[in-house]
Amino acid sequence: MRSTTAQEPVAAPVTTAATHCPYCALQCAMALATSEPGAPAPVSVRPRPFPTSAGGLCQKGWTSAELLQTPDRITTPLVRGGDGQLHPASWDEALTLITDRVSRVQAEHGREAVAVFGGGGLTNEKAYTLGKFARTVLRTPHIDYNGRFCMSSAAAATNRALGLDRGMPFPLTDLAGADAVMLLGSNPAETMPPSVQHLAPVRARGGLVVMDPRRSRTAVLTADGQGQHLQPVPGTDLVVLLALTHIVIAENLTDPAYLDERTSGFEDVRRSVAAWWPERAETVCGVPAAQLRRVARLLAAASPAGGGRGAYLLTGRGVEQSSQGTATVTATINLALALGLPGRIGSGYGAITGQGNGQGGREHGQKADQLPGYRSITDPASREHVAGVWGVAPETIPGPGKPAVELLTSLGQAATPGRPAGPRALFVHGANVLVSAPNAGRVAEALERLDMLVVCDFVLSETASCADVVLPVTQWAEEEGTMTSLEGRVIRRRRALPPLGQTRSELWILAELAHRLGSDVTFATDPAVVFDELARASAGGVADYAGLSHARLDADEAADGPGYYWPVPGPGHPGTPRVFLDRFATPDGRARMIAVDHHGPADDVRSGAPVYLVTGRVLQHYQSGAQTRRVADLNRVVSEAVVELHPLLATRLGIDDGVMVRLRSARGEAIARARWSDDIRPDTVFMPFHFAGSGSVNLLTSDATDPISGMPEFKVCAVDLTPGAEGGSR
């Protein structure tokens, strides 16, 4: 063996950490190989076997380690000085400033004058601690999170129909065994590519159905006899579902025994869909009546009652982000129940969670009306249980706060007759509301009215750039914790690197602020200890994690175990991969069928705004783009906002392919580069929502909300387009 001389490079020691991707709720498994600081490639990524991703990663996952060393990483607190600029500060200076201003604002305006806005990317431990901090230290009701923009309509609909909201109440791998899968407003081929392999057997059987006004990458998978692509008029998804249910009932394709034994409300639904025969529906939604009948019959043939292997109906943001989003998901569940799908192995309804911890984030305290364990904040027993874990009196826990859109638009507002004053200070954790919120111009005005804005982030996002104080926090590879995937599986996030510079975990930040604000409530900073407390707080709740711990999750993974899906009510409980098999989580055990009807979008096309705008993701970017726009390989492929429009519409408007276009809505205007495509309806244009500045599509989107869920109507509004705008969108 050749000896190593002093002049020869010595290989840096390599360690590996088994963790999961920092992006979407698929939570693909990865191993991070780390070497000593100063090595040419201190972190490398490779995929690990895992059921949801089956050893795969998308482009975002493969390049995720680049963010750990992005040149503009924030590594020290920043405080805005008298010159209006952000300057480095010590932790003591930053936390003292925050403490003094919070104390002054609450002394002058009351406890409700401080608000908190969280994110669906926070670990369960951090989401739990953020909710606890808001309610025991700040003692404000005003906490919500960006999951309100993601899962709220599906949550509202499943809670009232099935009694429990777990995005997918079955493992993702179950899809492969079905004869039919219908995706409503979801484009997993771009948003979570490794998941598409689970659809391959369904496609081979001709059973994939995709509903989308665009011929997305997912919709293309239905071509050549692999299934059906429905292209409804934007905002009319509910009409399609009402018509499909009408056909199933009219043609006696229901499961009568299942309806009789496991549901209530069928007669109300039967009467409500009687008016939506296929030919009438076609005049509203634009989907041919013959295709509606083909799809209804395909789903029925795939159902257990029809002798098939099974069928699944899955909703995504395309149908949920609507002022009738809860009604649309309710109609989807009604159709699934009519076919006898939910609560059976091999069939069912589910919602595809988008954000990495969108599921866990709403279960443990970030939502305006919820306590840990998915408990209602208005339920006396729930308040008493959680108060006992926190060591506070139940009456000190505030009541429900405002949902996200209402909260953001109320910031800094003066009191008027019939309307209380809005919060004067805001903490933002894991969100970039200046890009991700609807009617973003109005949100910018609201942030300007604040006395104090504090943002915790690891890069200077658009929202952080406006803050009075920016606190640098750890990234996913620098922390321990847990996440809950789109199928309700609780998984471990593991630390591969020490925190960079002066960065700190939100657990430390919140504990330090609690102490400085004079609270005697205990805040642990060890994620394993925090999780144990979370488990106690969730015990007996809908989302019961009582039987879990970091140690149990680690031991299961080390033994190549099956993983744990909540509820896990005790240490010996194996978890619940499939819920509803014996009964639904309603008082009588029956699923509730609820009649709904169509009213259309709040901002419909009209003179002066004759074109529908729909929004969504592209493969290379994620959410507001604050992370992925900093990854060179991703940004090189898609570096600016584009507006996708059909050549027929482009020709009529005089818009050449590749030119800059100005889009106007009732709320604002944006600029993007035109891209001709025959994959979209001629009455519709598409823009991704990952870009800031003049290319931010949320300058245009509507902040009209669903009356039940508070979900904003991101997915459809009316716009006007004109060619020749100067400048770009970057």
Image: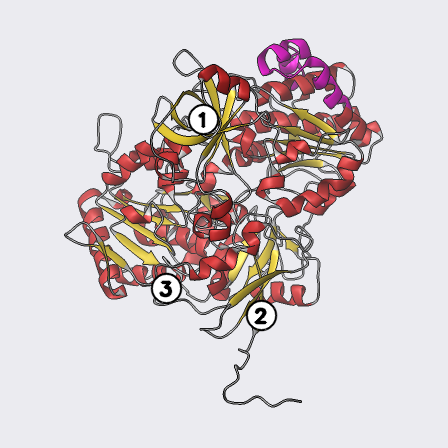
Other residues around mark 1 within 10 Å, as few (<14) / some (14–19) / many (≥20):
few
* Picture coordinates of residue 45, whole percent (x, y): 57, 62
Task: Name the element at disc 3.
Answer: loop
**For residue 606, which quarter of the picture?**
top left
Q: Which amino acid does label 3 sit on?
A: Thr
Per the image, the residue denoted by label 2 is 16
Q: Which amino acid does label 2 sit on?
A: Thr
> What is the CA distance from the residue labelled 3 to the residue labelled 1?
40 Å
Above/below status of 560 relative to 159: below
Mark before the other along the chain sequence, 2 or 1: 2
* Image quadrant in which the N terminus is located: bottom right
Per the image, the residue denoted by label 1 is 707
Residue 334 visible in image: yes
What span is in magenta? Answer: 268-297
What main secondary structure does the magenta stretch of the protein show? helix
> What is the CA distance from the residue labelled 2 to the residue labelled 3?
22 Å
